Amino acid sequence: MNSFWNGKRYHSLNYFLREKFGEKVFKISLDGGFSCPNRDGKISNGGCLFCSERGSGDYAGDRELSITKQFNDIKEMMAHKWKSGKYIAYFQAYTNTYAPIDELRRKYEEALKQEGVVAIAIATRPDCLDDEVLDLLNEIKNKVYLWIELGLQTSNDVTANKINRGYKLEVFEKAMKNLKERNIDVVVHDILGLPGETKEDMLKTIDYISHSGARGVKFHLLHLIKQTPMVKVFEKGELEFLSQEDYIDLITKGIAMLPKEMVVHRLTGDAPRDLLIGPMWSLKKWEVLNSIDKALEDNDLWQGKDFKI
C-alpha cells in the first residue's frame, strides 16, 4: 500500500496540497455575493434542478459579510481543530466569474490579501468565461496557485437538458480549451445518480473527464435537497436514489479509470441534515469514505489501473 499516495489508492487533494506546499492547507469557502445566469433569467430562472437555494454554497460564508470578515470567521472556527496551516480562498457559491470585471478583481484581490492564503479556487460555469475574465484569471495565476472548478455533472447532453444545466457539452469543451491554453488548472465536478442515468452513462462521464485534460475531479453523490426543483422530479417517481453499495461500486471503478496525475478533490459530498431528503445513508460520510478504501483494497483497484490512453 505504501507505494501508492501515502497509503491511499488514489491521488487525494490532501496528498497533492501537502506535496505542493509542504504543510496542511485548508479551504475557506467564501460567498462572493454573485448570481448565476441560470437563475437570473439570462439562461433560465430555475437554476440547475439539483442546486440549493445557496447556489451549492451551503457551507460557505455569509454573503452579507465582506470577504475579509467571512475569511476570518471561518479561519477562527478552524483554529480550534488545527493549530497551523495555510489557506485556499475558495469562491464556492453560485457562479464566481459572473459579475463586472472590476467587481471580480476587487473580490479576488481582497481574498488574496488575507494572511496565509497560498491559493485561490474559483467555482464557475463554462459559459461564464469570456476573454476579459480569462485574462484576469491568467493574471492571478501568475501571482498565486489558481484552479477553476467547472460544473460538468454529466457528459450526456440528454441528461444535461433534463437537469436544466443550461449549456451543451461543446461549451464545456471550448472553456477547457481556453483554460488549457493559459495553463490554468481545472477541476471538473461530476454528479453520480442523476435522473435517468444508467451505470454505463455514469462511467462514460468519468471516462470523458479522465481524457478531458482536467487537473482534478470532484465526485458528488446526487443529494435531494428540500426546496430544489429536483423535488418535483422525485415526486413524479422519475428519480431513484443510488444505494450505498452501488455508489461505492461506481466510485471505485471510476477511480481506476482516472489517470494517475489527476487529483481527486472529493469522493462524496454531504448535505445539511435539515435540508436532505435523501439518500440518508450519505450523512455517514466517514463510513462511506472508509468503505471506498476497503472496496479498492478488496478488489485490488487503484487510480490509473484501468486508465486507457
Image (tube, rainbow, N blue to C red):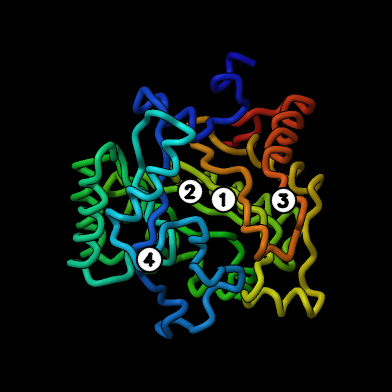
Q: Residues within 10 Å of mark 1 (few under 14, many from 20)?
A: some
Residue under label 2: 212
Q: Going 34% across and 50% down the picture, which residue do you hit? A: 71
> Where residue 182 sits in the image (x, y, percent)?
26, 48
Q: CA distance from mark 4 to mark 2?
A: 33 Å
Q: Compared to 252, does 8 lie above or below?
A: above
Q: Compared to 64, does 246 lie above or below?
A: above
> Where residue 103 sits in the image (x, y, percent)?
22, 67
Q: Compared to 199, does 238 lie above or below?
A: below
Q: Compared to 139, does 164 lie above or below?
A: below
The amino acid marked with disc number 4 is Arg
Q: CA distance from mark 1 to mark 3?
A: 25 Å
The amino acid marked with disc number 3 is Ser
Relative to 262, 2 lies left or right:
right
Task: Residue 25: name its quadrant.
Answer: top left
Q: Going 62% across and 26% down the picture, which residue do you hit? A: 9
For residue 282, the mark is 3
Residue under label 4: 63
Residue under label 1: 208
Residues tagged 1 and 3 counted as in contact (Cβ below 8 A): no
Residue 174 in view in this figure: no
Q: Residues within 10 Å of mark 2 (few under 14, many from 20)?
A: some
